[in-house]
Amino acid sequence: MLEKKRVEELDIIKGVGMLMIAVYHLVYRAQDGIPDKIIRSLGWALIAVFFMLSGYFSNPDKGVLNNYKRRFLGLMFPAMMAELFLLGVGGIYCRFFHEYSTRDILHDAAVTFLRPEITTKISTEWGEGNTLFLNLSPVWYIWALGWTLILFYPIEKLVIGKSLKWLAMVLFLIGIQIPIYLYVDALPWSLKIVPVFTVFMLIGMKAREINLVNRLKDVSLGMTALYTVVFFAVHFILFLFGGTESYYISILGTRGWLDVPLVVLQLLVAFPAFFGLARLISQVRPLAKYLSWVGRYSLTFLLFHSFFGLIFSDLLNTYLKMGPNWYMENLGLTVTPEVFWKSVAVFVLSVICTMPCAVFGDFLARKVFERRLRWRELRQRKREGK
């Protein structure tokens, strides 16, 4: 199976991102404490960085329709297969350990794929999903990326290599995002903020055009360490006072319409900070190799970590479920050292169990790719024979 040329620092960023998101979901901490604010600020910024990297690695030479096909096969199809597997196994688990009925399983499956914003309008009895849904909810990222790619590819062809058109499109998307963000409540939030996700991808495309990665790699390690600290500090201040977290959860932030340009500014500050961190990590070879490996399989880690979190949190009796209950305060409890360290164990065990899933998924993907390649060659030979 042929692979794209990989950039180790970018793989490290994705690896750090996946582990940080797993910490965000699985490790208990006091709500609104400094550790919690740091974890939340980095987690939300990394989502923007992931979209930016999708734009960075786009391939406009393939054409819009070919890119749709390529990304669907390379992203959507395996992601949906993984989700169906997790729903099946998770459904059996919840049936035996959480007294789920078949209806409950089907309900949570529907909420997982359609999102509560849609299912609650179909039937008020459905609510917003229960234990199984909350442990599979990272699928929202797949839907958001899919809708964003549909919008991004034709825009990319229109503005690539044309800086003024690119800037005008970025400003236009920000302009239409503001009223959608402020006044449109009917859409699922992962779809509601697709215009700004498209902006993130356009920024990634422009970063590739100006060769930003190689320029950052040319900076000395000392200066890299300095700007990394400065950009992380600025990013944290933006998170505390900019309302950007409220933007992601579709609740009107304290800054109102300013949330939209502020979340774009947050990305512009966060990416060089994470790149600088990744470059420093790359000097520590064992750690760099592991994180870059995780980054290569970031989608598997995204989809599977919370599923294993459900099982291990049950087995260790740390909390009832993820989602809104990852803060003890929401359960009327306080964080104890025992619960904290058990939640850390859940995080470690979930990451360990996800690793063989990544290897197996890669093996299957290679087999499917090889079979498709052989089928194409066979079809080509038949055409030539005619």
Image (spheres, rainbow, N blue to C red):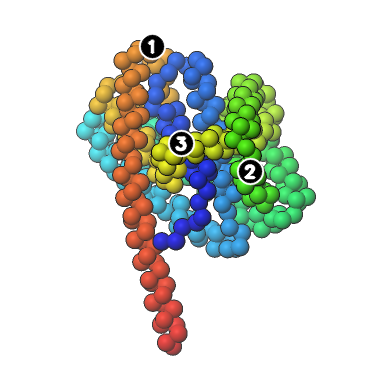
Q: 295 or 157, which is in the foreground?
A: 295
Asked whether residue 202 appears in the rendered view, the answer is no
Say what amino acid the circle numbered 3 marks: Val
- Depth check, mark 1 against mark 2: the one in front is 2
What's under tag 1, amino acid-wise? Answer: Thr
- Note whether 307 is above or below 70 in the view shown: above
Apparent side of residue 96 relative to residue 295 in the rendered image (left or right): left
Q: CA distance from mark 2 to mark 3?
A: 18 Å
Badge 1 or badge 2: first in the primary sequence: 2
- What is the spatial separation of the Cα atoms under label 1 and label 2, in whole angstroms? 48 Å
Q: Earlier in the sequence, mark 1 or mark 3?
A: 3
Q: Nearer the viewer, residue 332 or 115?
A: 332
Q: Residue at x 31, y 26 (%)?
A: 345
Q: Which quarter of the rendered picture does the N terminus lie within?
A: bottom left
Q: Which residue is mark 2?
A: 218
**Outermost residue, right side:** 164
Residue 19 image position (x, y, % from top left): 43, 34
Which class describes the residues within 10 Å of circle 1: few (<14), some (14-19), or many (20+)? Answer: some
Local SS, label 2:
loop
Name the residue located 36 percent from the left edge and 61 percent from the top edge: 368
Q: Which residue is mark 1?
A: 334
| Image spot of residue 361 (x, y percent) | 34, 50
Residue type at tag 2: Asp
Residue at the far left: name it: 96
Q: Which residue is mark 3?
A: 284
Residue 251 in which image quadrant: top right
